[in-house]
Amino acid sequence: MPFEKYKDLWELKEEHFHRIHPDKAVLIFLDCKDVTRNHRKYNLLERDPVYRFLSNAAYNVAMDTQLSCAIYAAVDEVSIIFPEVQWLMGYFRVGDCADYILSLYMQRFLKHFWRDYPEIYLKGTLFQLPPKDIDRYLKYRQEVCKAVSMFYVAKENLPSEKYRGIPFDVDSIKKLLLKEDLYQILYRHRDFFVGIRKDYTADETPRLWMELMR
């Protein structure tokens, strides 16, 4: 066998690959680096905020690849959920290697996203969850993003001593915003507060996929 003396190094790489289970939905989570820390450069309350472009990029990739998915974007993150794992694997043609699928997906995503924000880098994660937990996951991310958006409003409008030490949960920060008459800002920026949910359903399964999956 060629390169037999390096077999241990190849196996080391193989051992650290993550594999996709065909019976669970695939979830790709992308999170912008240092966006919420830089309020001056990235104003998330402006007309065309980062999360809108994250949502648009994910939807564009779905159309490009014809892969059905659920998309949820808020604040500085986006989740893309693929319930039909076999079509995801069939499109990328790298077997069940989650590492390869994530990297190939991100390259397609960034091709769209960097047209508007070429200076923003993203942290990417791929993991899986049972189909029954998809709605629960989306609710979880919405609750987290609601809390983040409320703290963002507090940081934009209040001295730090007023919100420092408040627990990171929706109810605690909501009380402060109501007291300071700032909660109405979230109503004026509803997408920032609750996020953007999109679902893409592929028109048809490309013939190439069908041939690959035989």
Image (spheres, rainbow, N blue to C red):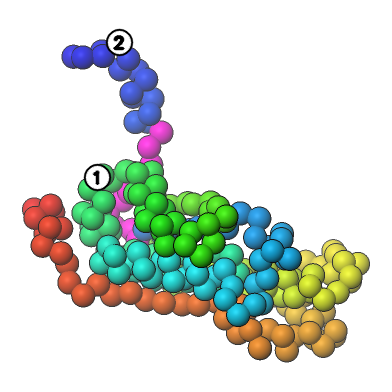
Mark 2, other Cα within 10 Å: few <14 / some 14–19 / many ≥20: few
Q: Is residue 154 magenta?
A: no
Can residue 179 be seen? yes
Of the two numbered discs 2 and 1 on the same chain, state the one appearing first in sequence. 2
| Residue 23: image location, x then y, percent | 29, 57
Callout 1: SS = loop
Question: Which quarter of the rendered picture does the N terminus lie within?
Answer: top left
Q: Which residue is mark 2?
A: 5
Q: Nearer the viewer, residue 101 or 106?
A: 106
Query: Could you say which disc has been placed on residue 81 in the image?
Result: none
Q: Is residue 116 above or below residue 190?
A: above
| Residue 11: image location, x then y, percent | 33, 24
118 lies left or right of 35: left
The residue at 25%/72% (across/down) is: 202
User: What segment carries the magenta color?
Assistant: 16-25
**Three-letter code for the amino acid on which mark 2 is drawn:** Lys
Q: Which residue is mark 1?
A: 95
